[in-house]
Amino acid sequence: MAAMEWEKLLDLERLFQSSHQQSARRPAYDQDADRISFSAPFRRLANKTQVHPLYDNDHIHHRLIHSVETASVGRSLGLEVGWWLEEQGLVGKGGQAVVAGLVHAACLAHDIGNPPFGHSGEDAIGAWFAEKFDRGEGLFADRLACFSEEFEAFEGNAQGFRILSGLEMNRRGGMRLTHATLAAFLKYPVTARVRKTLAGRDSGLKKFGVFETEREALETVAAKTGLVAGDDTATWWRRHPLVYLVEAADDICYNILDLEDAFTSGDLSYREAAGLLADVSGVVPQEDRGDTPGEKMAFLRAVAISKAFEDCSAAFSANYDAIMTGRFTAGLVEASAQRENFAEIGRLASERIFTSPRKTELEVMGRNLVHRILDGVLPVLEALAAVDFEAERISGYPRQLQRALGIDLRQARDPYSALHTLADYVSGMTDRYAVKIDRIISG
C-alpha cells in the first residue's frame, strides 16, 4: 500500500474554488478557523449538550466550550507533531505551523453537526426515522432511493461535513474550506451505503461520515489530498493522518473534562475524580497549600491534558509508517502510554456519569421532545411533496407552520432531499430552542 504524501495532504486549495488565491499575510487555515468560528452553526453549539442536558450551572461544559478547548489541545498536538515532522525532514520549513493550523481549524468544527441533547439526540432522530421507514408510507416509501441507512443511524459527523461543504452559506462548497481542513475533519471518509459493504472488514471506520448528498465533495477532498483508497472500488478512503490528532484532542478533552464536570455536578467525589487525573498526570497535588478541592482539580486537569497530548504525539511518531499507509486503525490514545488510564476513566463514566439520574431523566425528555418536533414538522414536507416540491404552492396550516417555524425548504426537491431538510432543521436546533419549538407545536 503506497504511503500518503504531505505535499498533497496539506493542500490549501479551497473546495470547488480552485481560482482562490491564498493571502501571503493570512494563511488559508487561519481563514478556515475564522469562517468556522463566525458561522451560525458554530455559535449554536453554545446551547447544545456536551454531557449534561439543560444544565443551569455555568461551569458545566457545553459543546461550544468543548470545541474551543479541543481546538486548543489540537493546536498543541499539531505543534508537537509538526515540529517532529520538520525535524525529520518529512515536511518543509513552516510545515509545523500548517499542521497546527489545520488541526486547530478541524477541531473547532469537529462537533458542528451534533443535534440537540448530544448523542441521545442522535439516537432519537435515528429511532424516529427507523420507525417511519419501517411503516414505508409517503416520503418513506422507497428505502433505496432515500438512502434510509443515512437516517436510521443518524450521524453528527456526516451532518457536520454536510454543513461545512454544502449547507452553510447555501452555495456549492458551503464554507469553501481548504481540502486539507476538510480531510482533517473527515473522521469517517465513507458514505453510509458503502460502509454497509465493509461489514466484518478491518477498515477502522466504526461509523459513516458522509451523506450521499456530499459524495462529490468527499471524492474531491480525497483526490486533492491524496488519501489512500480503501480498496479497488475507490468508494471509501483511509483516514488523513491529521484526523488522528483531531480525534486525540477530542478524546483527551471529553475524558478529562468530563471528570471535572462530574466533580462539579456532584456525580463524583473529589477523591474519585482526582485519583483518576493523578494517574494520567503522574502528579499528586500538595495537600498543605490551602487550595480548595476545585482548585486542586483545575491543577490536575491542566497537567493531565499536557501529559496526555505529549503521550499521543509520541504515539503518532511511533506509528508513523502505519498511519501514512492507512494501516493504522486504532486511536492515538489507545496506542499511547495512557491507554489503561483512559480506559478506566471510560469505565467510570459509563457506570456513574452517563447514568446519573438527572442526565437519564433529561435524555428521556429530550427523546420524546425530538420525536414530537419531527412529528409536528413532517406535515410541512408532506404538503410540499403533494405540490410536486414547489414551495410557493403550499397553503393552509402547513404554510403557516413553515413560516412560524422558519423552515428552509430551498434544498427539498424530492423525497430524499426533503427528508434531509427535515433532519437539517431538527439537528440544527439548540437544546433550548428545541424546547421552544416543542411548545409552539404542542400549543
Image (cartoon, rainbow, N blue to C red):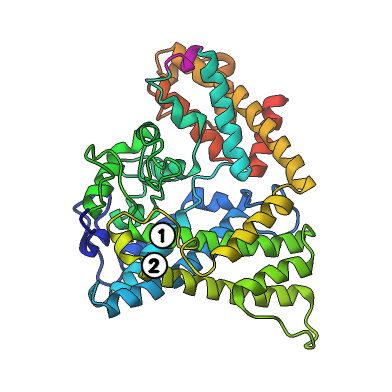
- Residue beneath the point at 37% across and 70% down: 318
Kindly report the distance in space between the C-alpha atoms of the residues bearing marks 2 and 1: 8 Å
Could you say where residue 113 lies in the image, as x and y percent from the top left?
Answer: 49, 45
Tell me the SS state at disc 1. helix
The residue that disc 2 covers is 316
For residue 372, the mark is none
384 up-or-down from 48: above or below: above
**Could you tell me which secondary element the residue under label 2 belongs to?**
helix
Q: Nearer the viewer, residue 243 or 156?
A: 243
Q: Which label lies toward us, 2 or 1?
A: 2
- Classed neighbour count for the residue bearing mark 2: other residues with Cα under 10 Å, few (<14), some (14–19), many (≥20): many
At 59% from the left and 43% from the top, the residue drawn is: 119
The mark that comes first in sequence, 2 or 1, is 1
Image quadrant where residue 89 sits: bottom left
Direction from residue 294 to residue 72 in the image, left or right: left
The quarter in which the C terminus is drawn is: top right
Residue 358: in sight, yes or no? Answer: yes
Q: What residue does disc 1 label?
A: 244
* Left or right relative to 241: residue 277: right
Image: 299 above or below 113: below
Query: Residue 83, how many percent across, how many down?
Result: 34, 77
What is the x, y in percent for residue 302?
61, 75
Q: Out of 197 and 129, give the one closest to the viewer.
A: 197
Residue 140 lies in the magenta-colored region: yes
Give the residues in magenta: 137-142
Picture layout, residue 302 above or below residue 189: below
Mark 2 and 1 residues: CB-CB less than 8 Å, in contact? yes
Is residue 176 part of the magenta span, yes or no?
no
